Amino acid sequence: MIIVKSKHEVEKMQKACTITANALHYGGKSIKVGMSTYELDKLIHDYIVKNGAKPSFLGHGGFPGSACISINDQVIHGIPSKKKIIHDGDIVSIDVGAYIDGFHGDSAFTFPVGNVPEETMQLLKVTEESLYKGIEQAVVGNRIGDIGHAVEEHCVSYGYGIVRQFVGHGVGKELHESPEIPNYGKAGHGSRLIAGMTIAIEPMINAVGDEIKILPDGWTVLTKSGSPSAHFEHTVAVTPDGPLIMTKPTVL
């Protein structure tokens, strides 16, 4: 069931989204060559807690970290580890959520570290562009398929693969709510968007091929091709005045 929020609920949810966005921004600024993903996760955890919120991901479904930190060919759900070291030339996707006052926020960004190859930088640029093309379609009266179609059309034009087994989702009092928001689809198809829906739009785009595999840890998702993957995400409210990006950072 799709849960529609009142204007007051959307305003209340904004606090969780702002903490989420600022934690993500802080995490990105904190990345250093030689740092472990465990260290990075701890910094993000402490930032969220310091701001009075709880990390949405910690313990969710048994996940052991406060953020999903995925490097290079890891698509999503990378488990923070003392053994996973960040190197020059890596791309690091951080996916994070914060819970406060009864609501969650959810956001992700893929950060380049040092000397990243030009073709990988293009993947990041195009994936981030596709996120905003999807957000542009999150207007009252459109359908979910319009969002996915916008993402897919942009990324496929560059020859990139679309992850299909994992999708965006509603977000609010629960971290994952209905409806699902695929990064592919037919324009004019799917549930109609109405004011008060709050959704996480999150393109997961592979340099080569759609196919993925999951490690034996049950969490970490990799590209089957071994090629890099990018992940960008915002929590967005559908409003009468157009899409409202709720996970914009407010810190420098």
Image: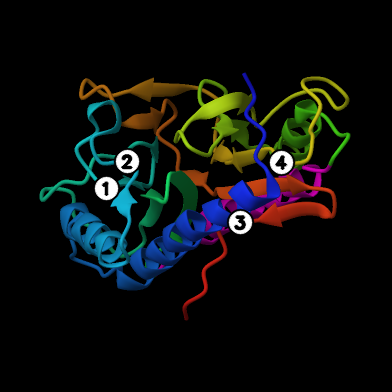
Relative depth, front residue between 90 and 39: 39
Q: Secondary structure at mark 4?
A: loop
Q: Which numbered disc, 4 or 3, marks the residue that appears first in the sequence?
A: 3
Q: Is residue 164 above or below residue 34?
A: above
Disc 2 and disc 4 in contact, CB within 8 angstroms: no
Which residues, given as a range, are shown in magenta? 115-139
Who's the residue at 43% across and 44% down the image?
102
Say whether residue 222 is left or right of residue 13. Answer: left
- Can residue 116 be seen here? The reply is no
Residue 48 figure quarter: bottom left
Q: Amino acid at mark 3?
A: Glu
Query: From mark 2 to mark 4, how far is it between C-alphas?
Result: 24 Å
Say whether residue 158 is left or right of residue 15. Answer: right
- Residue underneath mark 4: 196
Query: From mark 4 to mark 3, how far is it between C-alphas?
Result: 11 Å
Q: Position of residue 39 (x, y in %)?
A: 17, 60
Q: Which numbered disc, 1 or 3, marks the residue that appears first in the sequence?
A: 3
Q: Position of residue 69 (x, y in %)?
A: 32, 48
Crowd rating for badge 2 (residues with CA inside 10 Å; few <14, some 14–19, many 20+):
many
- Residue underneath mark 1: 66
